[in-house]
Image (cartoon, grey):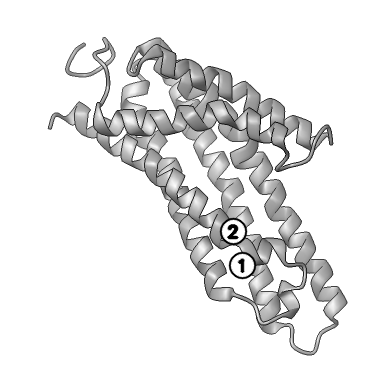
Amino acid sequence: MSSTRRTAFVAGVLFIITFIAAIAGALIYGPVLTDPAYVTGAGADTQVFLGASFELVLIVANIGTAVVLFPILRRQNEVLAVGYVAARIVESTFILVGILSLLTVVSLRQEGAGRDPGSLMAVSRALVAMHDWTFLLGPGWVVGVGNGLLLGYLMYRSGLVPRGMAILGLIGGPLIIASGTAILFGVFEAGSVWQGIATIPEFLWEAALGLYLTFRGFRPSPILPDVA
């Protein structure tokens, strides 16, 4: 396996890991996100810790995709390649803040014996709301800039993947940004059908990219080290 093929394979696997970790984390977090009385009940702390673990893996994979691709993408446009790395770091920072907010809910539950239940629930709801905002602004907005516009443009211009595939990113990125902005200003709610529709092109772009890089690798391009 050549170094270029290995780079594509590692990047593809990391993209696939981001999908698995993101979906698993969101599903496992369930109780702390949906139960307003979680902080005063028996709790499912181990489940929350497992969800946090998946999201930590997500952070590593997120940043890994950008770092692994950087030596290739910089040959197309170094400024945009650096921007992609920065966008992934910003997205991951939002995710990390969301993790900390939910782990704080667990700490409140564990140490809240004898405290006013109403106050505990109020603080818990605030922390869950913080998690919801970090999800909106990170995976629900910044990802449109990074994975959508920047990576989509770099892949389109370089021809490293089929250009029809890269166009999905160029369409999905603005839709994710517009959707997140609309939720921010109350045009529609998070989790609505409109947000779901807006997410489809970006979802397809990232899924197709991960699978393509893993099983096919880069297409021949002048920017590849063994082609230039």
Q: Residues within 10 Å of mark 1 (few under 14, many from 20)?
A: some
* x and y percentages locating residue 111 in the rendered image: 69, 83
Which mark, by number, is residue 103? 1
Query: Which residue is labeled 2 in the image?
Result: 99
Quadrant where the image shows the N terminus? top left
- The residue shown at (76%, 73%) is 37
- The residue shown at (45%, 44%) is 19
Task: Specify the amino acid type for callout 2.
Answer: Ile
Q: Residue furthest left?
A: 1
Q: CA distance from mark 2 to mark 1?
A: 6 Å
Left or right side of 66 for 40: right
Is residue 146 visible in the rendered image? The answer is: no
Relative height, residue 60 to residue 121 (above, below): above
Circles 2 and 1 in contact, beta carbons < 8 Å: yes
Image quadrant in which you'd find residue 223 = top left
* x and y percentages locating residue 211 in the rendered image: 34, 33
